[in-house]
Image: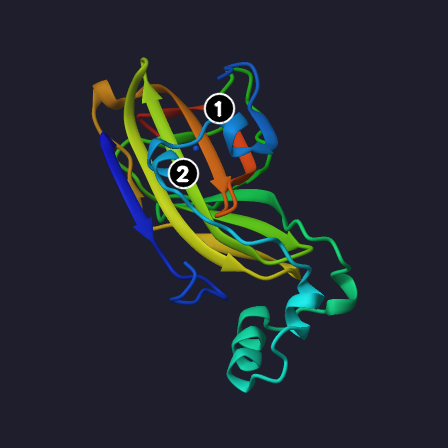
């Protein structure tokens, strides 16, 4: 680990113009970004946002502009406007995290995590290759600039700070899935042990949809 990186990626309905502590429990909350602790980089950015508009109203605006109409259709895909209503605030709910590794079967973890008897949300083998895949739903309105941040500590020392821009997503009944880039856990005796982590998902409006604090373990072998 011992790294800090930021990734920008495109997903589903992205456009070029839009732009991971308590050892006893994992804790999950839906709060504002101020309450869940804004990132230093985000606090330095001044974002000027216009008023929120309902999805149906957005579609009615500029309906005579053919290029804008096609752009909105491409962004929204097959969304059913009868299920959207007039709620302005988008809502993102995370269902599960799947840990994918070529060395073992997929490990599916419902969100929020349910720690084991030792307080760990999950365990990874040292030196293993793995990917994280999140499943989530979007309702009510378009969520713009959804980004993932994951910070990891070992014995109180920050060893990883990962930031990924997931993109912009329109509401739909079917869950979205987003798979992060492959990573490799640190290897060796000193890399094993307990790690604490904080995972957040925040959008461009500063709304925090998921804020999780939890422990995980790196072991010599995969758990049975």
User: Are there few (<14), some (14-19), or many (20+) residues within 10 Å of tag 2?
Assistant: some
Disc marking residue 80: none
Residue 165 locus on image (x, y percent): 39, 50
- SS class of the residue under badge 2? strand
User: Are there few (<14), some (14-19), or many (20+) residues within 10 Å of tag 1?
Assistant: many
Q: Mark 1 points at which residue?
A: 214
N-term mark: 2 or 1 = 2
Foreground residue among 50 and 95: 50
Disc marking residue 149: 2
Label pair 2/1, CB-CB below 8 angstroms: no
* Residue at x 60% of width, y 30% of height: 29
Q: Can residue 99 be seen in this view?
A: yes
Q: Can residue 223 be seen in this view?
A: no
- SS class of the residue under badge 1? strand
Residue 159 locus on image (x, y percent): 27, 26
Horizontal side of residue 28 vs 17, given as left or right: right
Foreground residue among 125 and 216: 216
Q: Quadrant of the N terminus?
A: top left
* Residue at x 69% of width, y 53% of height: 88
Horizontal side of residue 102 vs 122, given as left or right: left
Q: In this view, does 120 lie above or below 68?
A: above
Residue 67 locus on image (x, y percent): 51, 83
């Amino acid at each position: 680990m011992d790294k800090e990186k930021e990734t920008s990626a495109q997903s589903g309905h992205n456009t070029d113009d839009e732009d991971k502590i308590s050892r006893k429990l994992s804790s999950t909350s839906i709060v504002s970004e101020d309450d869940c602790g804004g990132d230093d980089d985000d606090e330095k950015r001044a974002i000027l946002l216009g008023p929120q508009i309902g999805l149906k109203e957005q579609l009615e605006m500029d309906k005579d502009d053919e290029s804008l109409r096609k752009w909105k259709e491409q962004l929204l895909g097959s969304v059913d406007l009868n299920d959207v209503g007039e709620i302005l605030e988008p809502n993102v709910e995370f269902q599960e995290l799947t840990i994918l590794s070529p060395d073992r079967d997929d490990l599916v973890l419902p969100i929020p995590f349910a720690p084991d008897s030792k307080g760990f949300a999950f365990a990874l083998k040292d030196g293993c290759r793995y990917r994280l895949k999140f499943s989530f739903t979007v309702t009510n309105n378009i969520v713009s600039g959804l980004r993932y941040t994951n910070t990891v500590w070992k014995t109180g020392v920050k060893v990883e700070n990962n930031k990924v821009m997931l993109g912009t997503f329109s509401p739909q009944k079917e869950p979205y899935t987003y798979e992060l880039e492959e990573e490799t856990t640190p290897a060796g005796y000193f890399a094993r042990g307990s790690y604490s982590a904080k995972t957040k998902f925040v959008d461009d409006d500063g709304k925090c949809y998921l804020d999780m604090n939890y422990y995980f373990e790196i072991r010599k072998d995969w758990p049975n």
